[in-house]
Amino acid sequence: TEQLIEGKKLLLSSAASHQKEILSLLDKVINAGWTLYATSGTHQFLQTHSVASILADNNLDSLFAKKQIDCVIQLPSQQGSLCPRFQLRRLAIDYQVPLITNPQLAMIFLQCLPELYAKKDQPVRSWQDLC
């Protein structure tokens, strides 16, 4: 979909069923210089496990309007509850911020995220150079 992640500010909203899975990956993301925003339930879980995050529930509109969010990971519960976080998904779409809602994709994305800018200075090579 040709969306770019230009900064290092990630908004995370996760159902309880997915929170433990992503916990181990978040330390590497934060150590790579990413700022982590979280919705209330996710923020509370992260604080309990000593992971730094900024509570974003009360000012979601202004965070998106001021372009303070570069990527959103929103992992819904398996029951498919649409109402509570519909606003978050809608804001991400309206402000053209990349949005990930698939748990497996989110895990792979979080594994790769710390290296996103680390390899930026490497020269572009042809695939033939690698063969």
Image (cartoon, helix red, strand yellow):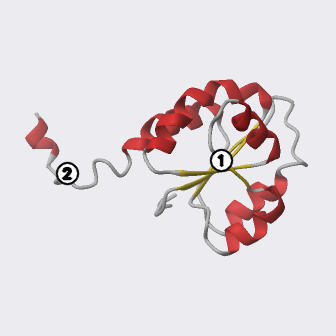
Q: Secondary structure at mark 1?
A: loop
Q: Nearer the viewer, mark 1 or mark 2?
A: 1
Residue name at image x 83 percent, y 50 percent: 85
Residue name at image x 55 percent, y 36 percent: 26
Q: Nearer the viewer, residue 16 or 37?
A: 37
The percent position of residue 11, horizontal first and vertical second, equals 65, 52
The percent position of residue 74, horizontal first and vertical second, equals 70, 44
Q: Image height check: is 127 above or below 91? A: above
Quadrant containing the C terminus is top left
Q: Which mark is residue 3?
A: none
Q: Nearer the viewer, residue 117 or 46?
A: 46
The percent position of residue 5, horizontal first and vertical second, equals 48, 59
Residue neighbourhood size for the residue with mark 2, other residues' Cα within 10 Å, grouped as few (<14), some (14–19), many (≥20): few
Amino acid under disc 1: Ser
The residue to which callout 2 is attached is: 122
The residue to which callout 1 is attached is: 53
Amino acid under disc 2: Gln
Q: Secondary structure at mark 2?
A: loop
Residue neighbourhood size for the residue with mark 1, other residues' Cα within 10 Å, grouped as few (<14), some (14–19), many (≥20): many
Residue name at image x 81 percent, y 40 percent: 41
Q: Earlier in the sequence, mark 1 or mark 2?
A: 1
Q: Image height check: is 28 above or below 123? A: above
